[in-house]
Amino acid sequence: MKAEMNIPNISQVKDFFLSLQDEICKQLERLDGHSNFMEECWQREEGGGGRSRVLKAGNVFEQAGVNFSHITGASLPPSASAHRPELAGRSYQAMGVSLVIHPLNPYIPTSHANVRFFIAEKEGEAPVWWFGGGFDLTPYYGFNEDAIHWHTVAKTLCQPFGDNVYPDYKKWCDDYFFIKHRNEPRGIGGLFYDDLNTPDFETCFNFTQAVGNGFLAAYLPIVERRKNINWGEREREFQLYRRGRYVEFNLVWDRGTLFGLQSGGRTESILMSMPPLVRWEYNHSPEPNSPEAELYTSFLIKKDWV
């Protein structure tokens, strides 16, 4: 029975990812109340394809991208097989849902989430597979209530899978989404995991479903609380400046961006995580004791929120 549970059901995973994309888009459209997602289905010459969905110029969301992709290949790019020599000579499939939401109101945080599955196969040998994913929050103006809620949802969904899951994956998220050249976190973290293939396929898949389904429960209440706060030029300028940090991390440090580009992924879909507007300012420093300064001192720190 144990061996059977460890045989990946690829079609089951794909069905979940497609339904998750549908549900997230449906709920974001409902909350925005103005703009709808436009969809572009695409095929990859090397194998596989996907459907990219982007919402633009909404009442609540300036831009939101929710992508599904399922790519296949005869062999991995050298950068991947160099770190995982057991993958050399294997065909592979990589699939998942990835999303980035850039709200219009600076008091609503930017958010990112993804869930993914990878499998590499070779005739006569057992497949190599794993799940990965998580979600993280990037506020421009910090609210303790939001941070506590975000991490409470994360901790609650992890609890059925073990007492150490939330603290381990929270730390992994804090460490991963750290902008090394700025020496600061990208946001307040959340969950991050990769290479998940134990104890068995069913448990790993159940956890990945919990993470994917948990995203809306974590994010939508925050959007509802903040979407009607009045804001002006000052808040907008700070939001655009801080979006620059988001761009820097994704282009310099993010492994998913690098893998997508090196594996011949669809560039438009990979870079849909970029905000529509952004600014940089030389040697910027917020006014002391301002709400902008509080972001750095009280929120862009490693902290146990729950």
Image (tube, rainbow, N blue to C red):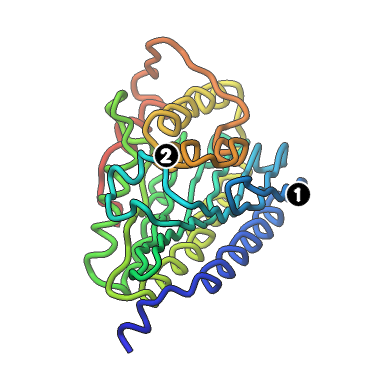
Q: Are marks 2 and 1 in contact (CB under 8 Å)?
A: no
State whether residue 6 is above or below residue 108: below
Q: Secondary structure at mark 1?
A: loop
**Which mark is on residue 142?**
2
Q: Amino acid at mark 2?
A: Gly
| On screen, residue 234 above or below 47 | above
Instruction: Give percent across and percent down for residue 18.
Output: 61, 63
Residue displayed at 70% across by 53% down? 29
Q: Where does residue 236 sit, x and y in percent of width and height?
A: 57, 25
Task: Decide if residue 227 is on the left or right side of residue 173.
Answer: right
Residue 126 falls left or right of residue 20: left
Which residue is found at the position 49% from the left and 62% from the top? 212
Which element type, helix, strand or loop, lies under badge 2?
A: loop
Amino acid type of the residue tagged 1 in the rendering: Asn
Q: Along the polypeptide, which appears first: circle 2 or circle 1?
A: 1
- Residue that numbered label 1 is attached to: 36
Nearer the observer, 64 or 132: 132
Whole-Å distance between the Cαs marked 2 and 1?
28 Å
Q: Position of residue 69 (x, y in %)?
A: 58, 53
